[in-house]
Image (spheres, grey):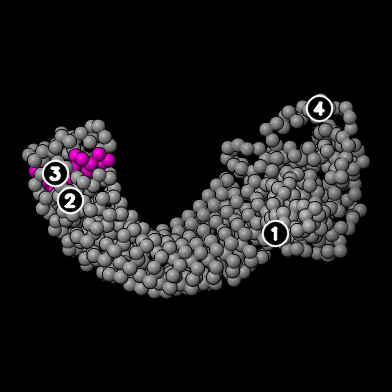
Amino acid sequence: IVAGAGTLYTNFFNGVMGGVENNDGDNAVVDGHTGWNDTYFTMMGDSSNPENLNASTTEDEHHPVNENIAQEEDDEPKNNEAPNPFDKARFNHIRYTLINKKASPPQVFLDTQSAQFAALVWLTRDDARQLDPESVYICQRYGLAVIWFSTTKSGYEWHIPENHDAIEEDDEDDGDDGDEKEDDNGSNKRRRQNDRKLVKQGNDPNQWFRHDQWLSSDGICGWEGITCHPHDINANNNANNDALQHDGNNDGDVSHVELRRNNLHGLIPEELYTTLPYLRVLDLSDNGLAGTLSDGFGSWNGSSLEFLNLTSNNIAGSLTSIMGSELSSLKELHLANNLLVESIPHSIGTLKSLRHLDLSGNSLRGTIPYEIGELNQLSTLNLSWNLLVGNFPHELSELQTLVTLDVGHNSLGGPMISELSRVKYLTILRLNDNHFSGELPTEIGHLVHLDELYLNNNDFRGTLPAEISNLDGLDSLNVANNYFEGEFPPEFTSMAGLQKLDISSNKLRGEIPIFIDGMSNLRSLNMAHNDFSSSIPSELGSLYKLEYLYLDDNEFENSVPNELGELSNLKKLSLHNNFLVGEVDDRICKLADDLFLTQLSADCGGEIPEIVCGCCICHDHEPIVHLNDEP
């Protein structure tokens, strides 16, 4: 997916591939890495002519590395030697297969420090499974190996298990007692030595957190985070061909790659989409992957991909390459919390199967393309925390299946379109932290399935529509920091299911309705920074679930109602910057002494305090200045 996977593998090549050890354990080539390059190009022959891929050469047949390889082929393997000799013909055969099937371009194998070259050598020499180069699974096994080498920071030492020392001791103790017998898959010793490369679990910052069986002798279907398409593992014994449970010890067609929060770093190689044509689910979220989305992404080799999650990485660039018609099966696209820039391309309308789209937490610019309105299966649209501008597209009102719409924390403007009321199944609507203006349309009361409505930090004005009270299922309503005026709508007191209400920092005035005790499920009520007056209603003391009550910076008069002492769940109570007088009742102070109240503020400071409170955070009464007052 990400262009330019050129990670260095110096440790890998110097430590494992730089040269072949002799019987004394010494490196046969002084500069192992250089020696390997020479041998490699000898094996490559004329790479421009496929007929020469398997051709043997003679001019370098006395090269020190070649002599060692020949010696290994003749000698009985010893405990301190490489587990198997290097097969040049197999190397070239696999390489030709990979090139022919367009798994990787030929030039990547010229770089002996590339992840692709490391994966090719592993398949050739160190993979105990030793798949036939013509196997239908060779490309997929290669592709996963490339992912490994592209996103790790060290070499084969990663693959040594915790009991490595014990295994070595067992080998030494065995000595020459009983020769290893070869089975159909090669020597038992070779398989055991390769199995030592199973990745050990640990919290090393250079390791994947979970990596069981990766690069082991197991089939790829048994590797951590890999799932294969089901198939009949007992086809010969099952006439009905009904058994669909996959054997994890086998290779198969990969359907899921799920390595979320697994400490992957580096660049995502293009082999991910050139070698896994049957991939349905790709989840690499919450890692440290970087780079840009490559141009080839939109032409994924196969159209089966349904779920793509690269959330919370460091992927940069634009979205243009990802919006291709080849991704016609894509149902979920999650690219939140990355470094994406530029605009959302109009070609996003080609992703007709899309149900969940999350591009939040990037630096996307420009307007919201109207083509999103063509995604008639869309259920979730999250474009929050970007740099989007312009008006709200009317076409979004055509998304009849939309359940969640979040465009908060942008620079969008204009009025809230009344046509949005057509999206009848909408449960979450977040337009907060933008520049939306004008009056709220009364049609908002038609969104009867809303659970959350966030309109705070905009430029809305006028009165709060009483029709909001029709939203019986509403849990959270936030209209703070706008220019709403008028009185608190008495119809709101019938919203018995509402748990959070924030109307702070507006120009609301008048009295709090005495029927506010009808909002019996309120846990948080913020009415601060308005112009409410008269007495604080004692009925607030009947809202027994209240945890947060903010009444500061208003014009409330008279005494603090003693009934507030009945709010046994209260954690914060702000009463300062009002015109309250008298003494705060001991029952309220007892909430601070014996229960959960941690913050109680009132105008009990100054030389002549307006209120007496022995348990309050005392403020001097200050003139009320609303931050959203117009000049």
Q: Mark 3 is on which residue type?
A: Pro
Left or right, residue 473 beside residue 567: right
Res. 140 in view = no
* CA distance separating discs 3 and 2: 17 Å
In the structure shown, which secondary structural element does the residue marked by tag 2 occupy?
loop
Q: Quadrant of the N terminus?
A: bottom right
State the residue position of label 1. 275
Residue in view at x 10 percent, y 40 percent: 611
State the residue position of label 3. 561
State the residue position of label 2. 553
Please tell me which of labels 3 and 1 falls first in the chain: 1
- Residue nearest the viewer, comparing 316 with 548: 548
Please tell me which of labels 2 and 4 falls first in the chain: 4
* CA distance separating discs 2 and 4: 81 Å
Q: Which residues are magenta?
A: 564-581
Percent x, y for residue 273? 65, 60
* CA distance separating discs 2 and 1: 63 Å
Please tell me which of labels 3 and 2 falls first in the chain: 2
- Residue nearest the viewer, comparing 287 with 450: 450
In the structure shown, which secondary structural element does the residue marked by tag 1 occupy?
loop
Q: Mark 1 is on which residue type?
A: Thr
State the residue position of label 4. 172
* CA distance separating discs 4 and 1: 41 Å
The image quarter containing residue 92 is: bottom right
- Residue nearest the viewer, comparing 543 with 113: 543
Residue in view at x 23 percent, y 47 percent: 543
Whether 616 is drawn above or below 465: the answer is: above
Please tell me which of labels 4 and 3 falls first in the chain: 4
Q: Mark 3, mark 1: which one is toward the viewer?
A: 3
